[in-house]
Amino acid sequence: MPVASFHDFAEVCQALGQTSSRLQIADLAGAFLAGLTADEAAIAARMMVGQAQEQGAENQLQISDRAIWRVVAEMTDAQEQGEDIFAAAADFGEAVEMTLRRRSIEPDPTLSLIEVDGCLRAIAAITGRSSRGRKLAALRELFERASALEGKYLAKILIGEMRHGMSEGLLLEALARMSSRPVAEVRRAHQVEPDVGRLVLRLRAPAAPVTATPNGGDAPLEEAARVSRAASSSAMQAGTPKPLRPMLAAPVANIAEAFRILDGNLALEHKLDGARVQIHCDDRHVRIFSRRLNDITPSLPEVVEMMARLGSRRAVVDGEVIAVDAAGRAIAFQELMRRFGRTRDIERSRAEQPVRLFLFDLMSLDGAWLIDVPYADRYAALKELATDAGLELAGRILPASVVEGQQFYARAIGEGYEGVMAKGLDSHYTPGARGRGWLKIKTARTFDLVIVAAEWGYGRRHGWLSNYHLAARDPATGGFVEVGKTFKGLTDADFQEMTARLLALKTAEAHGTVVVRPEVVVEVAYSDIQRSPRYAGGMALRFARIIGVRSDKSPDEADTIETVAAAFDRQLIKPLASQD
C-alpha cells in the first residue's frame, strides 16, 4: 500500500467543506480512511476533527494561532498585510493559505501523514530552556515544506478548528463505513475509548472486541458485574488506564422542570464549584484525570492518598475536587487552578492550598464496567465503597415532592453552592453525552456591561463583528475596565444588527479588532469571576454570554468595577455544609 500523503488528506478535507450532505460527508471520509493503513487512518481520523495529538495530550503542543501567524507572516513578509488578509479570509486556515500563496515558489507536496504526525509529536516533546524558540523553528520548517493547501489544514488542525462539517458524530459514522460495522457498535466503543485514533486501531483489528461492556439494561448490579467482568476494556487492564469522557448534564430552568423531565424519579445533589476528576484505582496505582482527560495525578498527591484507602478494590469513580481554606470552607474555583498541572513544589502547594474530594458516581468496580447499570444501583455501590474507605460524597437527597426539592435548592444556594444536579434514578452513565439523565439547575449571575471593542468573526460569523470586549465602568477615572469577552448569546440577526451598530461607533481598528465608543450596554450572564492578569482590573468573567441589549440604559448606568470586585470577594469564601 503506498504511503498516504498529507496533500491527499488536505484535498479530502477541502471536499468535505464543499459538501452539505451528512451522508456524503460520512461516505467520503469513510472511503478515504478505508484506503489507509491502520496507523495512517488513526492519524487522519484525529486530524479530521482538529485533534493534533492523542486525547489528553493536546496541551503539550502549546502552539497558538499567533505563533502560527508569526511563522507564516515572516516566511512571506506579510506582517504589514495581515489586517487585509484576515478581513478577506473566511477563517484562520484560509488566511494562512492566502499568505502562503504569496511565496514565489510553491513547494511540491511531499509530506506524508506519518511525517506530519511525527513532526507534531517532536514539537510537543520540546521542553526546557528556549523551548518556545525551538518549537517555532520546527514549526517553520514544517510550513516551509507545506503547499498552501496543506498549510491551510495544518493551521486548522493546530488550532482545533477544522470548520468543514465533520463533527465527531459524523466521524463515528465514517468509521462505521470504514470498518463495515454497525454505527451503534462504533458509538458504543467510542464511549469507553474517547480517542478516535485509538478507536480506529481497535476497529481495524478484527480479532479484538470493540465493545467494552454488554448492554446490561436494568440487570441487578451483581449480574451486570458478573457479565461485564469478562469484557473489561483496556482502561482497567495493566498499563496506563484510558479515561472515559465524563457524562454531561443538560441545563433546566428550575426544580419543577427537572421533576417533569425525570417523572419525579430522581435524586438531587449539590453542584460543587470545583474541578471534575475521574479517578482510576487498582491495588497498585491511583491515576487522576481532568475533565479534558489530562493526567493530573502528580498535582494532587492527597487525592492519591485518599483513594489508596480502597486497598485491593479496583474502581473508576467520578468526582469533584474543590479548593478550601484552613477551616475547610470552599473557596473560589480559580484558587484550585493553581494546583492543576504543577509538578514542582507540590508539598508547598499542598500546604498553601488544600483541597477536598467529593465523589458522586461509580463507573467501574472490581473490573466490571457499570455504565449500563441504573444510577440508583451505581450510587448504592459507591456509597458502600466510600463509607468503607472514609471518603466524602456530595450532599444528596431523594425528594418526595417538588416543594421538598425547591427547599433543598434554596438551602444549597444559601450555603454557597452553584446550584443542584438532578439525576434520574434509572439513568445509565453515558460518557461524553449531554442527555436527559442528568440535569443542572443553577442561578444565573448578571452584570450590565459596556462593549468597548469587537473582533471580526470567522466561519459562520465571517463578516460580522463578534467576540465583544466587555467592560465595567470606573467611576474614579470616568473610563471603562475590561473584564472579559464573549460571542455567545446572539442570533445571526443579532450579530448583523450589532455589527452595523458598532461600526457606526468605530474609533480605531487594528489586527482584526474594532475599537468603539463605549455606548452599547448589554446584560451579561456569567458563572463566576476569576483572577486574570490579562485585564487591567485583574478579574475576568467565566462563561460569559449576552442575554440582552439594555437600550434603556446609558453607559454611566453600567455596573462599576467596584461592583464586579465586590462580587468577586463574595465568592472567594463560601460556607460548606457537612456532607451526607
Image: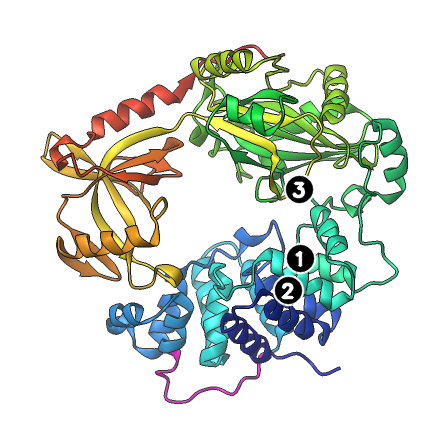
Which label belongs to residue 45? 2
Q: Is residue 108 left or right of residue 364?
A: left
Calculate the distance from the C-alpha at mark 1 to the C-alpha at mark 3.
Answer: 14 Å
- The answer to whether residue 282 is visible is yes
Which residue type carries mark 2? Ala
Along the viewing direction, whichever of 571 and 282 lies nearer the viewer: 571
C-beta proximity under 8 Å, tags 1 and 2:
yes
Give percent across and percent down for residue 422: 58, 25
Please name the residue that numbered disc 1 is placed on: 196
Q: Quadrant of residue 459?
A: bottom left
Measured as percent of width and height from the top left, residue 104 is found at 37, 89
Residue drawn at 39 percent across, 61 percent down: 460
Earlier-in-chain disc, 1 versus 2: 2
Establish if 231 lies above or below 384: below
Taking the spot 77% from the left edge, 66% from the top edge, the residue there is 179
Q: Which residues are magenta?
A: 100-111
Q: Is residue 344 above or below residue 116?
A: above
Quadrant of the rendering where the N terminus is positioned = bottom right
Amino acid type assigned to the residue bearing label 1 in the image: Val
Q: Residues within 10 Å of mark 3 (few under 14, many from 20)?
A: many
